[in-house]
Image: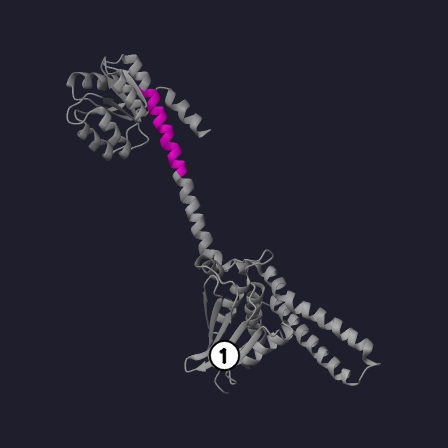
Amino acid sequence: MVTEAILTQSSATPTVKHPVLVIDDEYGPRESVAFALSSDFNVDTAERAAEGLAKIRAREYATIVLDIRMPEMDGIRALEEIRKVDPLVAVIMLTGYGTLLTAQQAIAGGANQYLRKPPDIMELLAAVRKQAEGTLVRRHQAKLTREALDLSLTLKKEIERNEPQVWQGRASVELVHDLNNPLTVVIGYATLLAEEARQLAARDPELGSKLLDYTRMVERAAEYCHHLSENWRLSTKKLMEMKRLDLMQIARDVQQVIFFGNPAIQITGAADTPVLGSKFELMRVFQNLFKNALEAGAESVAVALTRGTDGLKVVITDNGPGMDSDSIRRALQGGYTSKASGTGLGLGICRHLISAHGGTFELKSELGKGTEIRLTFPIAQPG
């Protein structure tokens, strides 16, 4: 392990002399300790705590040898200040006879070891070597921790930056997501068609007309499924085919074909709503927005289309449970859903398709007050 390697290397005679600071107001003891340590360490000295603190702020030391009894600022107070500047450096307190209680208080306050003054030379060397090793280990562990935190922060930012595009990398899930509703419609209408066909011979001929209507519904839903399948297969080779379309009619087709004419969806507004776009891609937009509102618990979805000088505006308002600000942010980024089986792709798909049509997307919501989505599209010019 790295820590073991550090300890093994440091326990031998050091090839690099690590810096040690001796702080003592008495010249003789200070220089004596410095001389004793100079064979193994690069020793610096200070005669006052303030001077020592200035040096600690300027560089990192492996160990600090600190006298307790000093004028102006004693060792206990100096230790508190040292820990504010460098919480990792080892501190050895020197105390004269009769002040062991003070030394013990220093240990409780963050000192790593204390020695009686004047210290035994061999005991002093052994203590500084041991404490210097400890400082090296702590600094190395702190460095690894910082690097891990920095990496974690970088990864988090990268994930957040790429989150809006997550759904693009899950195109197969998107395909299943969008095919699910029209396929359900195909099955539902096919069942109705078969039932009516069985009764047709014995019922009123008007059922023939009804049967034809059901058949047309199946055809329209199947055509939609075919488009989605082809769009997936040729997505890297084919651009959307843009035509002049009636946006109001597209919204009504989705309500009728995909949602069986659900009366909870009410569509009102301008009669003339021309846009330049892809019919089936715009159907996907309305499909996802209606589906999200209804599955979230909305009992009514009001769709209002207006035509202005700055484009066509579509406002979709529901009376569902609404969302808080964090849920709105996550929903707009993509990959967020409140449903147990949801993929969180719906809004991402809508924003992408609306942008491809030159439109804009805005979502407003509040808990307990429902959700409002505003879309704008350029008006298609005649010709």
Q: Residue at x 66, y 73 (%)?
A: 221
**Prevailing secondary structure class for the magenta stretch in the rendered image:** helix
Residue at disc 1, secondary structure = strand
Q: Residue at x 68, y 73 (%)?
A: 222
User: Taking 249 as reference, is 45 left or right?
Assistant: left
Q: Indicate the amino acid at tag 1.
A: Leu
Find residue 244 and report its image quarter.
bottom right
Residue furthest right as drawn: 202
Q: Position of residue 181 (x, y in %)?
A: 64, 67
In the image, is residue 76 above or below residue 340?
Answer: above
Please tell me how crowded label 1 is: few (under 14), some (14-19), or many (20+) other residues with Cα within 10 Å: many
Find residue 325 and report its image quarter.
bottom left
Q: Is residue 35 visible?
A: yes
User: Taking 22 as reference, is 298 left or right?
Assistant: right
Q: Is residue 17 visible?
A: no
Q: Is residue 160 magenta?
A: no
To which residue does mark 1 refer? 305
In the image, is residue 19 above or below residue 118?
Answer: below
Residue closest to the eye, 301 or 150: 301
Q: Position of residue 237 (x, y in %)?
A: 57, 68
Q: Position of residue 70 (x, y in %)?
A: 17, 22
Q: Which residues are magenta?
A: 128-145
Q: Residue at x 24, y 25 (%)?
A: 76
Q: Is residue 137 magenta?
A: yes
In the image, is residue 85 above or below residue 28?
Answer: below
User: Taking 201 as reference, is 250 left or right?
Assistant: left
Residue closest to the eye, 195 or 168: 195
Q: Position of residue 39 (x, y in %)?
A: 27, 18
Q: Residue at x 22, y 19 (%)?
A: 34
Residue furthest bottom as drawn: 383
Residue closest to the eye, 80 or 302: 302
How many labels, in total? Answer: 1
